[in-house]
Image: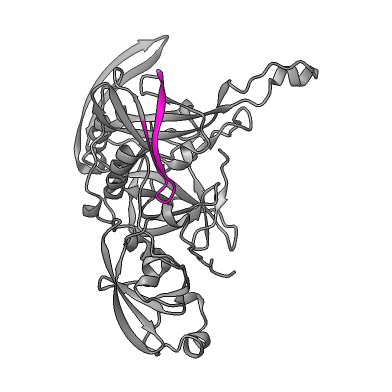
Amino acid sequence: MSRKDVTPNQNNLFKKFGISLAGGILGGMLVLGGFYAFGTPNGNGSSGTTNTTTTQGGATVSNVKVGVTSDITQAVEKVQGAVVSVINLQGSQSNSLEDIFGSRNQKNTDDTLQAVSEGSGVIYKKEGNFAYIVTNNHVVDGQQGLEVMLKDGSKVEAELIGTDAFTDLAVLKIAADKVDTVATFGDSDALKVGEPAIAIGSPLGSQYANSVTQGIISSLNRPVQSTNDAGELVSINAIQTDAAINPGNSGGALVNIGGQVIGINSSKIASSSGSGVSVEGMGFAIPSNDVVAIIQQLEEKGQVVRPALGVSMIDLSNISVQQQRQILGLPESVTSGVVIRSVNGATPAEKAGLEQYDVITAIDGNPITSSMELRAALYKKAVGDTMEITFYRGDKEQTVTVELNVDQSILQQEEVQQLQPNQ
C-alpha cells in the first residue's frame, strides 16, 4: 500500500496514516526533546514520591521514585491493551537474492507473503472463540494476508471480514485466546471542543507500537473528503485533534479522558496545497458513533449497502453568480445547494421527477449546502426508505418524496462529480 497525499475539498493535502514498508528498511531521524515533568496532570491525579540518598565515590546520588496516577494514565490503562498493530501481507514477485545473481531458474515465490505496510487497529468485541478488530480500509488495501501484533508482541493471523471505502473502515477477526482487553466505544455526539483527546497506535509501524500522545478535541464535524489509491471517494464527517499522529497511526484509537474510544484515527493535513507550507497538529478521526453503525453492517454483510439517488451533481458554490441567474434561473435568495448535472434512467431520482439543473436545497427539511452533505444525508438512509427533497426549478421552490428502492451495487456506481476549488 503506497502512502501518498490526497486532495480534499478544503484545498489541503491529507495524508493517510498507514506506513508503507515496501521501499525497504525505514530510515528516520530521531529528534530529542525535553521532558515536561508534572505530578498531577490536568489537575486531576496524585503522585507518591520516595527519595533515597546515597553516596558513591564522593558523589551524592538521589534515587527519586515518583508514582503518578492521573486521569490520562487511567484512561490509557483501560484501552491500551486493545490497540494492536495491523500488518498488511502481500505476495513477493521475485526472490531478491536470485535477482542479484541473475538466476534464470528462479523459484516461484508467488505464494510467499511479506509485510508491505503497517497500521493500527482496535479490538472492540470478543465473542466465543473470536475477537473483532476495527481498522482503516486503506490499512488493509491490497492485502493477500493479514497479521495482527498484540500488545505483548505476539503475532496472530487475521481474517478480513469486510471493508467500506467511503468511510475508510474495515473489520478483521482473530482468535480470541490471547485477547485480554476489549475497548469500549464512547458517545462521539457528546464531545466538546477543548476536552482532552488521547491517540494510541503504532506510528512508523510496530517498532513503536502502543505509542500514546495527548492533545485536545480541536473541532467537530469537519468534512474531510479525499480519494483513495483505488480512485474511490472517501468522505468523513471527522473529529479534528491536535494529538500527535503519524504514518502508522491509521486505524488506531482516539480516546477520551474516561478511556473510551471516541474515534478511529484516519488522516491528517500534511501541508497546504496552495503554498506548500508544512502543517502540524491537524489530525482527523472517524467519530465512534459512525464507526459503530458501519462495523455492525460489515460484520453482518461484509459491506455497507447504501441507497442510490441516481444523479450526478455539482455544488452550486462552484458555479458563477451569472450562470446561477442566467442558466439556472435561480432567485437571488438562493446562494447554496447542489445542482443536478444529469439524471440516470430508471432511478429513484427519475421516478420522482427530478430533472437536470434542478437545485437541491434541503433533505427532509434540513438545509443542504454541498454534495458531500447530500451524500451524508442519503447514506443515513436504508434501501426502502423515503426521502423528502426540496429543490428549485428555475425560480420556483418545489418538494418531492423520493422512494430509495435502488442500491449502489445495482447502479454499478453513482456518478458523482465533486469539483475541487481553484481548478
Left/right of residue 203 with respect to residue 43 in the rendered view? right
Residue 125 is covered by the magenta coloring: no
Report how many numbered discs are placed on residues in the image. 0
Q: Where is residue 366? Give x, y as percent.
A: 27, 71
Residue nearest the viewer, comparing 241 with 35: 241
Question: What residue sits 44% from the left and 36% below the top?
Answer: 34
Q: Quadrant of the C terminus?
A: bottom right
- Which residue is most to the front? 346
Residue 168 is covered by the magenta coloring: yes
Q: Where is residue 191? Give x, y as percent.
A: 24, 53
> Image height check: is 419 above or below 396?
above
Give the extent of the magenta segment: 155-172
Residue nearest the viewer, comparing 315 with 6: 315
> Image height check: is 411 above or below 180?
below
- Which residue is most to the top? 57
Q: Where is residue 12? Give x, y as percent.
A: 52, 59
